[in-house]
Structures are given as structure tokens and as C-alpha cells.
Image (tube, rainbow, N blue to C red):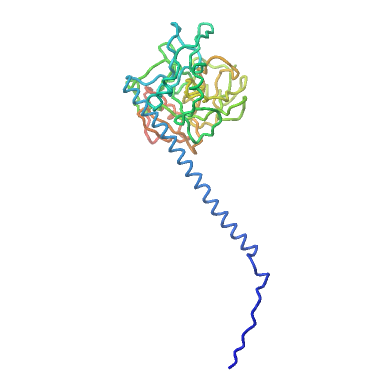
Amino acid sequence: MKIIKSPSREPDPSREGFTLIECLVVLFIIGVLLALLIPAVQSSRESARLSSCQNNLRQVGVALAGHHASFGRFPGGVKLSTSRDSQPFAAGPGSSIGAQLLPLLEQSPLFNSLNFVDVPTKIGPWHWSTALSIANTTVLATPLSGFRCPSDSPTIYPGSNYRGCTGDQTFVVESEIAPSGGGAFPELLLTNASFFLDGLSMTVGFSERLTGAGGAQSSGSLRDVYSRSGQPVVFPPDADEYARLCATGGGTGGAFTNVGRFWLASGLEETLYNHVLGPNSRVFDCTRLAADISLGSMDSAGLSARSRHPGGVNIMLMDGSVRFLKSAVSLPTWRALATRAGGEVVSSDQY
């Protein structure tokens, strides 16, 4: 039987490659995979940044415990200069809590290079303290990763994201003749464990705040502190009244855009905060200080804890533990956590 071979068929040019529908299907699948992958990668990166931020706060907590063990007290909310010529205060920003903890944060050489003595300039009866003096120029410009949260974008240099809590009121100074918010780190009052009648584990010592937007005066940024000077506020300023002032605006306008610039300096401008507003409050932080002031310190303000972590902020309690606290926490609970001896009863399920 004769086998007849079929003629070979040339490939049809119209059948080469993929059809348009096939390409669209492939692109659709790739798009779906990317849509699933990118959020997962971003979430993983933020988890790492959150963990790093919490570790920074834990190191601060360890340093605070070491300071208390060595000196029988915690560092003050501000360290004034050592030669004040019998003046009651040293005006301007003193040195921060972080600056006082440097030896316990493995930064002894940096601590030894600090100058805690008054600069010669006098303005009226006041001495300017040394944190921002020329003698500390090199230290001022030194960045410390332990004072920066990696989730915050670097808007100003060297910057500081961790702040000591002055309490639930707007005024930072606490003494026998001055009011305060009764927090862990008031100015002019040194505390020890016996001051914390609410318990160290129920009192916030540190939290986070974004650094200012930097540059010229701006508006619409939750990073900055807005001036409401000229608005009537009773003295001492009440937290609820101040919160209303911040929410309604008014005053001369302008904003402090370089807040949190120096980890070395104390004060509400740099390394202190309060619980007048809730964490990550949508209300802008504000002060009655004129935004263009060149001398003096921000002695009262509504200054919230703020972060770029989704849904909340990290807090360090005075027993050294670190927790992630949701932005949705109630304002009464938030304020109760700010006081060391307010007598409030707060259960862990409230925050």
C-alpha cells in the first residue's frame, strides 16, 4: 500500500505571537499580583519602622531607670545652666531630658562635649541658657538615630521625634508657686518614683511627635504649631479652653515650622509635649506665642503626640514599657495617662 505523505504546511503568519486578548489577560494578572504585593511590602516596611521606633523608646526607658538608680530621681524636664547668678530662671531653652541621658545611651563623649554654663548675654534680668549657644554648635548639629523615628520623613535637621510628657495641662513649669499639668517631666521640678501615686505603669513618660514642616511660615500642616496670640485665655490656661482655641483659630496667624529641630534643647518647641489634644488630633497644635518671636520660650501650648504610624502613636510608660496606643482613645483616658498623681482609675482595656 502506497503511503501518501501530506504536504508540509507553512506556519500561518497571522498565528505568530499573542493575541490582544491574551496580552490583556496577562497584564490584568500582573496588575492583580502587584496590587496584592505592594501593600504587603509597604506593610512589612512599616512594621519594621514601628519596631525600630519602639526599640528607641525602650532604650530611653532603660536610660531613665538607670538615671533613677544612680541619682535617686528622674532627669528634669529641663536642665538649666549651672551659673545663674541667683536668677530664678534661665530664659530660653535649657537642655533636654535626652541630653541628660546621653551617658546612659552610650553617648558619653557627646555628653562630655556639652556646655552647661551660661553664655554672657543678658536681656533684662534674664540669662539665656546654653542649649542653643555657640558653645554647643557642634553638638546641636549632631544627628542621633536613637532620637529619630524612621517612619517620620526628615523635614528638618538633625531633628527629634521623642518628647517628654509635661501632663494634661498647657503650662510646662511646675514649682511651689507655678501651676502645671502634673506630668512626668515638668520644668523646674525633679521627680522620683514616690511622686507617681498613680503608678509608674499608668503614667506616660514619652511619646512621639512629627518634626515641623521647616522653612517659611506655613498653613495646613499638622506638623507645625500655630500662633493664636491675641486670643483671650485665662491664666493658668485651661486644657479644654485651649483645645477650643486651637480648633477655632484666630489670633495673629503664622506658624512655628521648625519645632522638633534640636534634640539638645528642652521646651515645647523641641522635646516636651502635653495631652491637651488627643493623639494624632485633626486639630492643629497651637500656642498663644507670636509665631515671629525671636526670644523667649513656648511656655504654654496645646501640643499633641503625632506619628506617621497608621492608627496611633507609641507611648513609653514610666516603668519602661512601650505600647502602641490607638488614635481613637478617648480624651479623658488620654489625659488621665498624662498625670502622675491625678487619682484617675484607668483600665488597660481603655487604651
Q: Position of residue 213 (x, y in %)?
A: 57, 29
Q: Position of residue 173 (x, y in %)?
A: 45, 16
Q: Is residue 10 rendered to the left or right of residue 101?
A: right
Note whether residue 256 is visible: yes
Q: Position of residue 266 (x, y in %)?
A: 47, 20
Identify which residue, 294 or 344, lies in the foreground. Answer: 294
Q: Is residue 289 rendered to the left or right of residue 102?
A: right
Identify which residue, 343 or 75, lies in the foreground. Answer: 75
Q: Residue at x 51, y 15 (%)?
A: 92
Note whether residue 336 is visible: no
Q: Residue at x 65, y 73 (%)?
A: 11
Q: Quadrant of the C terminus?
A: top left
In the picture as drawn, the residue positioned furthest to the bottom comes out as 1
Q: Quadrant of the N terminus?
A: bottom right
In the picture as drawn, the residue positioned furthest to the right comes out as 14
**Residue 101, quarter of picture:** top left
Q: Residue at x 54, y 34 (%)?
A: 153
**Residue 245, quarter of picture:** top right
Identify which residue, 21 or 240, lies in the foreground. Answer: 21
